[in-house]
Image (cartoon, rainbow, N blue to C red):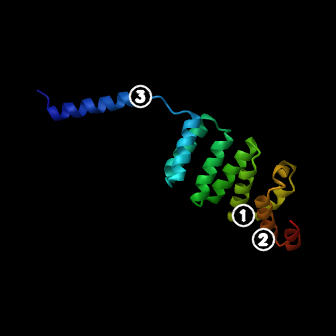
């Protein structure tokens, strides 16, 4: 006669596996929403997992790339954040993402890249955004071009 404790444990494990196999996977939008909630709650590792899972479903998701970049920025992984913001901007020209990208570039020591982007026609969409311009001016000053920074 089998041990009742082992039988209960076995049935519980089988039930858990069955439920996990039957549960519907979350959609891209649901994962991003959950990641946003985790970010707001300061649960950065959970936010990374959900954002990356959402990006597996849609690798060109501008929103997903932005969210992952924001998490990386909060984790002080500024190089990774800059990469994600750049990928987000490739999919969608968003001024707020451009500002975050500028911040990540400055914090990762890539001021010269930001100065170069300022002259890039692909970044004309952000030309009137004061926060973008402030980041560019800071990059120009860090690059030693204080006169241009003052004009910007």
Q: Answer yes or no: do the residues labelled 2 and 3 have beta carbons within 8 Å?
A: no
Q: Where 86 falls versus 108 (above or below)?
A: above
Q: Position of residue 120 (x, y in %)?
A: 86, 53
Q: Which of the two discs, 2 and 3, labels the residue nearer the N terminus? A: 3
Residue shown at 72%/50% (left/top)?
86
Question: Is residue 127 or residue 113 the one in the foreground?
Answer: 127
Q: CA distance from mark 2 to mark 3?
A: 54 Å
Residue shown at 68%/64% (left/top)?
107
Which disc is residue 106 wearing? 1
Q: Which of the two discs, 3 and 1, labels the residue nearer the N terminus? A: 3
* In-image side of 122 versus 91 (left or right): right
Which residue reaches farthest left? 1
Q: Position of residue 35 (x, y in %)?
A: 54, 45
Quadrant holding the N terminus: top left
Question: Is residue 2 or residue 65 the one in the foreground?
Answer: 65
* In-image side of 99 versus 8 (left or right): right
Secondary structure, mark 1, is: helix
Q: Answer yes or no: do the residues labelled 2 and 1 have beta carbons within 8 Å?
A: yes
Secondary structure, mark 2, is: helix
Q: Position of residue 40 (x, y in %)?
A: 54, 52
Q: Which residue is mark 3?
A: 21
Q: Which residue is mark 2?
A: 142
Quadrant holding the C terminus: bottom right
Q: CA distance from mark 3 to mark 1?
A: 45 Å
* In-image side of 110 versus 32 (left or right): right
Q: Where 151 falls versus 23 (above or below)?
A: below
* In-image side of 18 versus 102 (left or right): left
Q: In the figure, residue 116 lies in which quadrant?
A: bottom right
Q: CA distance from mark 2 to mark 1?
A: 9 Å
């Amino acid at each position: 006669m089998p041990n009742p404790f082992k039988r209960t444990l076995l049935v519980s494990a089988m039930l858990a596996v069955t439920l996990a196999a039957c549960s519907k996977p979350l959609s891209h939008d649901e994962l991003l929403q959950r990641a946003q909630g985790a970010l707001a709650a300061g649960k950065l590792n959970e936010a990374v997992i959900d954002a990356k899972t959402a990006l597996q479903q849609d690798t060109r998701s501008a929103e997903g790339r932005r969210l992952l970049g924001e998490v990386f920025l909060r984790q002080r992984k500024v190089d990774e954040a800059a990469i994600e913001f750049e990928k987000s901007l490739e999919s969608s020209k968003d001024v707020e993402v451009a500002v975050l990208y500028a911040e990540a570039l400055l914090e990762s020591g890539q001021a010269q890249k930001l100065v170069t982007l300022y002259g890039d026609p692909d970044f004309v969409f952000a030309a009137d955004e004061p926060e973008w311009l402030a980041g560019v001016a800071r990059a120009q000053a860090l690059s030693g071009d204080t006169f241009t920074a003052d004009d910007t």
